[in-house]
């Protein structure tokens, strides 16, 4: 008697390719309208991109900055903007690259879920809002882009093992590993961990011992290892600014509940609580609810998060960056539910939650953009090549909502090729250097542009009165006070107002030093030497 032919399981709506495409399109919606993606650090990156694109042709940028290309593990968006910028313009290039990051992250998460489980579990949809996690909102765009690439590469790694393409995998991932590292070295490390654990668990399923499985997994991921040889010279011999703040549990707790931090604190915290509840729900029956490879990977990433310092090799928020992806892997690790009605209800709830997050993010981004446009009207009064001293009013770090004005002043570099005192210096982590000595050791770079309340400012952030009294006026042409309340606008004969916002923000032309001595300068924009007349 012939054995019955198994009936293929019907594909459910959230497992279809069209659903995945729809989710990717939905992830792009918040970034579709704003011409400048309102991410905290992004405008600072854009200022650097202007320098890297135009320093060879600009009559001004080379006076204040230097830029030399080198192979470092933090160039994902820099290289894409370098390729696209001369063709479509800097601002459209940045928007296109940033717009692609959330959809690519969604594609990576759904791809990993499908390869691990053979289908997309309903619960995996809860991981999709993490494409707009706090690191992305903060503007860590090289890292976020590289993590999207790493997730897609991991899904490809699993697919090649499933479809019998393993013999081609070493050659392909020799290139893939280098490209992910070039985008951001942190993502390269995460990719290596995911591939190692997945390969080890696959070998174990085939009947090998733990030692054999571990050894063969180690050999399998060796094609990803060559970028490790670049870790010594990738900082060009420069000394990082430091690694410190280990095991700061108060900060780590803050990163956990801030994983969806955006604008509305109760909504963001409730969303974070929901996602952690989903991700940890498998602990009720861990051996049955978690797919082993992703479950072990989530545990290992959690341990790495606990052990990472807040500042690693001069890069701040090193541990915070891992949280959305650690949580996403835990959620994707949950196995499909057997009860179809429960699964359908969860899929509908997850899709609704993701849609709601996208809707609120879209509204928040539009509001940020309106605030940007109100302040950027000041640039209509700034000539090309001017030197701008920026002071931006920003809230305390403990405040959930932030105006995201920290680096808006870099738009003067983007649109007017200006020198602005808001670029950060990170030896070995980026390629821009500041060479404008007239601005002094303090007023030449970030965070000299940040103004917080005196009781909550960092030690290296200025006080308003001190900044106005001490910044070298002869080194600047304009003072741009961004989002500054009218009550704090200085009345100074050496500062001549040329633009005022309705209630916030003012632009001054600097005409005299603090002691009243006149500044006669044609250095910017017309190009002669500064002369100070007393």
Image (tube, grey):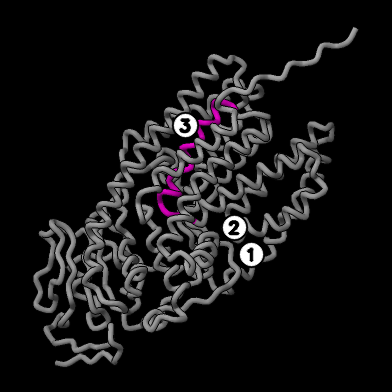
Q: In front: 329, or 57?
A: 57
Residues at badges 1 and 2 in contact (C-beta under 8 Å)?
yes
Residue occupied by mark 3: 275
Q: Position of residue 433 (x, y in %)?
A: 45, 75
Residue occupied by mark 2: 185
Which residue corresponds to the image point at 49% horizontal and 67% vertical from the top-left? 87
Residue 99 as seen in the image, left or right of residue 11: left
> Within 10 Å of the Cα at label 2, are there few (<14), some (14-19), or many (20+) other Cα atoms?
many
Residue occupied by mark 1: 231
Q: Can you see residue 59? A: yes
| Of callouts 3 and 1, the N-terminal one | 1
Residues at badges 2 and 3 in contact (C-beta under 8 Å)?
no
Location of residue 364 with respect to 81 vertically, above or below: above
Q: In front: 445, or 375?
A: 375
Comparing marks 3 and 1, which lies closer to the viewer? 3
Q: Quadrant of residue 451?
A: bottom left
Q: Can you see residue 215? A: no
- Quarter containing the N terminus: top right
Q: Position of residue 508 (x, y in %)?
A: 17, 72
- The verdict on residue 505 being magenta is no
Read off the magenta span. 121-141
Location of residue 514 with respect to 128 vertically, above or below: below
Location of residue 520 with respect to 453 vertically, above or below: below
Distance between mark 1 and mark 2 Cα atoms = 9 Å
Q: Quadrant of residue 293?
A: top right
Q: Position of residue 501 (x, y in %)?
A: 16, 60
Distance between mark 3 and mark 1 Cα atoms = 35 Å
Which residue corresponds to the image point at 36% horizontal and 55% vertical from the top-left? 35
- Quarter containing the C terminus: bottom left
| Of callouts 1 and 2, the N-terminal one | 2
Comparing marks 1 and 2, which lies closer to the viewer? 2
Toward the top, the furthest residue is 1
């Amino acid at each position: 008697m012939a054995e019955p032919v198994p009936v293929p399981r019907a594909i459910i709506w959230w497992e279809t390719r069209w659903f995945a495409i729809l989710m990717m399109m939905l992830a792009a919606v918040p970034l579709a309208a704003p011409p400048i993606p309102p991410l905290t650090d992004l405008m600072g990156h854009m200022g650097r991109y202007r320098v890297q694109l135009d320093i060879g042709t600009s009559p001004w940028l080379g006076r204040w900055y230097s830029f030399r290309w080198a192979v470092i593990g933090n160039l994902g968006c820099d290289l894409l903007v370098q390729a696209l910028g001369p063709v479509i313009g800097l601002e459209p290039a940045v928007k296109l690259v940033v717009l692609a990051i959330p959809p690519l992250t969604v594609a990576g998460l759904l791809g990993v879920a499908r390869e691990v489980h053979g289908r997309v579990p309903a619960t995996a949809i809860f991981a999709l809002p993490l494409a707009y996690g706090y690191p992305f909102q903060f503007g860590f765009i090289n890292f976020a882009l590289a993590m999207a690439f790493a997730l897609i590469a991991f899904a490809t790694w699993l697919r090649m093992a499933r479809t019998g393409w393993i013999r081609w995998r070493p050659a392909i991932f020799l290139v893939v590993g280098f490209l992910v590292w070039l985008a951001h070295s942190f993502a390269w490390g995460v990719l290596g961990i995911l591939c190692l654990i997945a390969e080890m668990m696959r070998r174990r399923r085939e009947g090998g011992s733990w030692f054999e499985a571990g050894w063969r997994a180690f050999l399998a991921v060796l094609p990803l290892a060559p970028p490790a040889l670049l870790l010594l010279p990738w900082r060009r011999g420069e000394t990082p600014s430091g690694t410190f703040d280990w095991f700061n549990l108060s900060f780590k707790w803050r990163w956990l509940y801030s994983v969806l931090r955006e604008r509305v604190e109760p909504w963001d915290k409730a969303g974070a609580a929901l996602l952690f509840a989903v991700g940890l729900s498998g602990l009720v029956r861990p051996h049955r609810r978690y797919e082993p490879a992703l479950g072990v990977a989530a545990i290992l990433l959690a341990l790495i998060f606990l052990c990472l310092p807040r500042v690693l090799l001069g890069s701040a928020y090193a541990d915070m960056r891992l949280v959305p992806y650690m949580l996403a892997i835990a959620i994707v690790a949950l196995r499909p539910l057997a009860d179809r009605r429960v699964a359908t209800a969860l899929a509908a709830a997850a899709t609704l939650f993701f849609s709601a997050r996208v809707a609120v993010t879209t509204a928040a981004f539009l509001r940020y953009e309106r605030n940007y446009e109100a302040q950027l009207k000041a640039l209509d009064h700034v000539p090309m090549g001017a030197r701008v001293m920026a002071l931006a009013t920003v809230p305390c770090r403990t405040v959930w909502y932030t105006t995201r004005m920290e680096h808006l002043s870099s738009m003067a570099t983007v649109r007017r090729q200006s020198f602005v005192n808001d670029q950060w210096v990170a030896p070995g982590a980026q390629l821009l250097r500041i060479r404008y000595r007239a601005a002094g050791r303090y007023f030449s770079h970030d965070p000299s542009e940040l103004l917080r309340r005196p009781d909550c400012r960092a030690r290296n952030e200025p006080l308003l009165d001190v900044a106005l009294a001490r910044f070298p006026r002869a080194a600047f042409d304009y003072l741009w006070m961004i989002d500054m309340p009218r009550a704090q606008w200085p009345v100074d004969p050496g500062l001549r107002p040329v633009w005022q916002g309705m209630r916030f923000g003012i632009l001054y032309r600097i005409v005299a030093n603090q002691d009243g001595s006149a500044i006669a300068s044609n250095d910017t924009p017309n190009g002669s030497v500064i002369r100070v007349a007393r």
